[in-house]
Amino acid sequence: MEPVPLSADFFAECKEKFYECPKRRLAQNACSRVDPFEVALSRKAFENTQHVFNYKVEKEGKPMTNQKSSGRCWIFATLNTIRIPFMKAHQLEEFEFSQAYLFYWDKIERCNYFLNNVVETAKRGEAVNGRLVSFLLNDPTCDGGQWDMICNLINKHGVMPKKCFPESWSCESSMRLNAVLKSKLREYAKILRDLHENGADPAALKAKILEQMKEIYNVVGICLGIPSEKFTWEYYDDSKKYNCVGPISPRDFYQQYVKPHFNVDDKVCLVTDPRPTNPYGKAYTVDCLGNVVGGRQVLYNNQPVELLADLVVKSLKKGEPVWFGCEVTKRMAVKQGIEDLAIHDFDLVFGVDIQTTLSKADRLLYGESAMTHAMVFTGASVDENGKPTKFRVENSWGEDRGEKGYLIMTYDWFKEFTFEVVVDKSLVPSDVLSVFTMTPEVLPAWDPMGTLAQ
């Protein structure tokens, strides 16, 4: 068809009809002064929200964590999940693992992974201005990550208490560090591609990457500090008894003190991707997505959302928290910490609805949905038929939002905006576990199922 221009008569008609409607004039008065999404909040939804649950883990983690101005939610969510059984086992009133420690190693490992991807894509014959390489160059070292990626870090580098490697300015506000790393990585990418095009052998390319990584090591160390090879952890348990662990390496600390209570290799990641192109009961991965060269592959086991919810409830009934990934800001009352499809009445304010007018599958296809945030389920309620109705969520945005940092999520919201959960493999049916043995289909690097790590 011919392009459709907008004429002066069209604008005049729209303006006349706009001001003929009292509701539009009222909405304009309100939305021109305050946040339009605040105007759209439903009073009735607040009245129907209570932070009380049938099932809740026995001992939730304290203090409430805060990732601040960084994209480390996946690290915070993992360590918040692990610390619950760890605190119970070691009789701790409060405890945090060092998020900065895993962030440090992810930055270094991620940069190396990127540089190796540069060489790999050059070998494939990918053009520098093609979609794949352009996508990789757009953000070579983002803060996000996936479950398999955190497993890579923990299995290779271990964990340590936060007191032994505390936060730094660039942990809490990672923009400047990332700007330096992005600039250097793009520069290094050109050098590596030029070497490949000029016929450099694998040994020369490897030597150049190691040379470049020495400079990356220095930049990251300057901004984040460099963790000690061994540390000593002193603490009082909840009976005020003094305890001391160490000197010990972070890897040995994980193996000896953490793994007996939470073994990351016993947990499996299930996703729900309803796009017709990606059938349930199949395995998927994302091209060029990862963080540790030689580490485990990011692997998605695609299952119906109802199964994910059922496994979350089973885990919580056993007292085990659940790591999960979602699209956090859709249909969310941020200050109150409520995730509910009924929390906003956009049609009342704007005369049109948003965010749920497309199906979940179509939102993925048309760029309206993607995984953006990782958190932890610590509680759930079920109805008389055993079906979930709502969930309690531990976030990593401090205590100022929700119920002292905890959110409440309805089951209807879960079905629309939750995309993956991590549960113990002992809870998963054998036919579902068998999917992990399949050769995964490779999704493109820019696929929305990879955005939590991009």
Image (cartoon, rainbow, N blue to C red):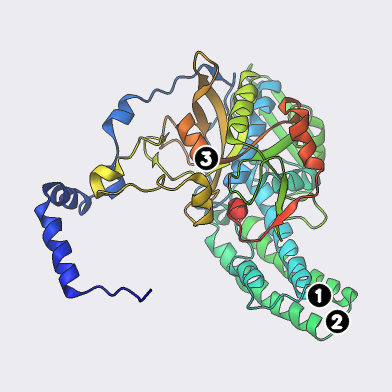
- C-alpha distance separating marks 2 and 1: 10 Å
Residue matched to label 1 = 208
Counting from the top left corner in percent of width and height, residue 417 is at 50, 41
- C-alpha distance separating marks 3 and 1: 38 Å
- Splitting the image into 4 quarters, where does residue 286 fall? bottom right
Q: Give the crowd class for mark 2: few <14, some 14-19, many >=20 residues within 10 Å.
A: few
Q: Nearer the viewer, mark 2 or mark 3?
A: 2
Q: Are marks 2 and 3 in contact (CB under 8 Å)?
A: no
The mark nearer the N terminus, 2 or 3, is: 2
The mark nearer the N terminus, 3 or 1, is: 1
Residue matched to label 2 = 200
| Numbered badge on residue 396 | 3
Q: Give the crowd class for mark 1: few <14, some 14-19, many >=20 residues within 10 Å.
A: some
263 vs 199: above or below: above
393 vs 75: above or below: above
- Splitting the image into 4 quarters, where does residue 257 fall? top right
Q: Amino acid at mark 3?
A: Ser
Taking the image as shown, residue 396 lies to the left or right of residue 235, namely: left
Foreground of the two, 270 or 211:
270
